[in-house]
Image (cartoon, helix red, strand yellow):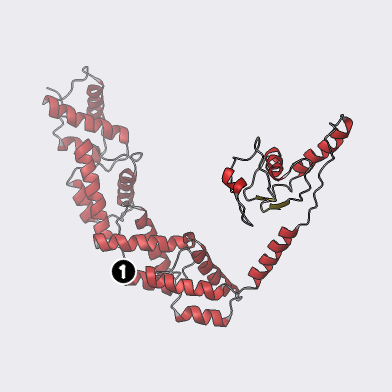
């Protein structure tokens, strides 16, 4: 403030944030500029007071760049003061209220600048920026990457609507601009896939990540003839496989199911996620006669349970663990497992036990009669 007061140059400016709101007076201020928006009309009036002085003949200029003084509350406060002060006894030094003339000059300037910007043709500028971006990044900008990405999408939309001039279309064609890549998410997944394949040298597998779902969507669109030539060309350029190796996929899932079984000592249940759902699909395929004999034998060799009665399966797995740990079979009175064994023997005698369950019990050496 001392330096500001001592300054003798023709123009000197003091920038302040929340420092000159109240309680400080600076002599010789000819103008006040509002550069930051404030919601408080009290603060706005206090800031205005920095260029005012009672009894001064100066005519300060107020430049309100952010419309702090245009709010209704500011004028309401000033109106209340005009009504309030005549009703009280004013001091001898009181010379009246200072009046302000609002010219609206800044709003005129802003309107003129907007008109000038509208008259300028920004297309060539953005076109040159696009060329520079492509040379630098080796790809086209995505919509989420700022103004240039949005501008590209605007050109694609305008061309579809028939509102883009032939000259602009020709210029964009000349640099190989991709018209069909409207969805920035598509390009994002494509870039992720390109990185994945460069590292793994293969396409993503099922359940590995979201990329696999995206890849399957592209395969389906390609089979239906809905995938554009540009997108097909982009995927071909990175060695994308259009046909899935279903045999490899089945084997991969089966190996995961086996790993689960060896770790938990029971087959995945339907409520236990993707592997449980896959097991149910195999059971359903076997019932419908669409599961190959080779796969059925492969699963039988590992003791896969085809029945969907998960409670029975749970008891069966408990029985296997009991025998492994105790080297004997539970008696009927020993625990619930013994009662379950009794029910299986009785069902066997009555001919009510399914061949599948009989085979599973005989596979672990279950005795049908107790000596």
Q: Is residue 352 visible?
A: no
User: To which residue does mark 1 refer?
Assistant: 238
The quadrant of the rendering that contains the N terminus is top right
Question: Residue 226: percent from the left, percent from the top?
Answer: 45, 69
- How dense is the environment of label 1, judged by Cα within 10 Å: few (below 14), some, or many (20 and up)? some
- Name the one closer to the observer, 310 or 128: 128
Question: Residue 95: percent from the left, percent from the top?
Answer: 84, 39
**81 up-or-down from 302: above or below:** above
**Residue occupying image coordinates x 66% and y 36%:** 22
Question: Residue 202: percent from the left, percent from the top?
Answer: 26, 62
**341 up-or-down from 333: above or below:** below
Quarter-wise, where is residue 280 in the image?
top left
- Name the one closer to the observer, 345 or 322: 322
**Residue occupying image coordinates x 33% and y 67%:** 242
Question: Residue 156: percent from the left, percent from the top?
Answer: 53, 71
Is residue 309 left or right of 35 when viewed as pictured?
Answer: left
SS for callout 1: loop
Is residue 32 left or right of 151 when viewed as pictured?
Answer: right
Q: Residue furthest right?
A: 87
Quarter-wise, where is residue 371 in the image?
top left
Q: Is residue 242 visible?
A: yes
**Residue occupying image coordinates x 61% and y 75%:** 163
- Name the one closer to the observer, 98 or 55: 55
Across the whole image, how many numbered discs are drawn on residues?
1
**214 up-or-down from 128: above or below:** above
- Name the one closer to the observer, 57 or 228: 57
Is residue 140 left or right of 87 when viewed as pictured?
Answer: left
Quarter-wise, where is residue 310 in the image?
top left
């Amino acid at each position: 403030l001392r330096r500001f007061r001592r300054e003798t140059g023709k123009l000197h400016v003091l920038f302040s944030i929340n420092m000159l709101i109240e309680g400080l007076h600076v002599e010789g201020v000819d103008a006040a500029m509002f550069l930051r928006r404030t919601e408080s009309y009290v603060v706005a009036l206090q800031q205005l007071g920095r260029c005012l002085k009672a009894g001064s003949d100066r005519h300060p200029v107020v430049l309100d760049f952010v419309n702090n003084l245009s709010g209704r509350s500011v004028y309401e406060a000033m109106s209340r003061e005009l009504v309030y002060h005549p009703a009280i006894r004013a001091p001898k030094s009181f010379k009246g209220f200072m009046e302000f003339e609002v010219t609206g000059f800044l709003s005129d300037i802003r309107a003129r600048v907007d008109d000038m910007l509208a008259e300028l043709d920004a297309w060539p500028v953005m076109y040159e920026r696009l060329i520079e971006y492509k040379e630098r990044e080796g790809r086209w900008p995505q919509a989420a990457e700022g103004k240039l990405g949005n501008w590209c999408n605007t050109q694609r939309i305008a061309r579809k609507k028939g509102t883009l001039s032939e000259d602009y279309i020709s210029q964009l064609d000349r640099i190989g601009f991709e018209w069909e890549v409207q969805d920035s998410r598509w390009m994002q997944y494509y870039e992720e896939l390109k990185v994945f394949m460069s590292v793994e040298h293969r396409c993503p597998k099922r359940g590995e990540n979201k990329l696999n779902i995206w890849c399957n969507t592209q395969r389906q669109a390609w089979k239906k003839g809905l995938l554009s030539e540009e997108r097909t060309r982009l995927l071909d350029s990175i060695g994308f496989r259009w046909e899935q190796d279903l045999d490899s996929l089945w084997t991969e899932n089966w190996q995961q199911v086996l790993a689960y079984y060896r770790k938990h000592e029971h087959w995945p249940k339907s409520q236990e996620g993707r592997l449980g759902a896959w097991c149910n699909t195999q059971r359903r395929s076997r019932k419908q006669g669409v599961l190959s004999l080779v796969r059925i034998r492969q699963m039988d060799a590992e003791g896969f349970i085809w029945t969907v009665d998960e409670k029975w399966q749970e008891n069966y797995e408990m029985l296997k663990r009991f025998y492994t740990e105790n080297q004997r079979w539970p008696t009927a009175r020993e625990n619930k497992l013994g009662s379950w064994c009794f029910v299986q023997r009785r069902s066997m005698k009555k001919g009510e036990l399914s061949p599948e369950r009989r085979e599973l019990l005989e596979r672990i050496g279950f005795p049908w009669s107790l000596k």
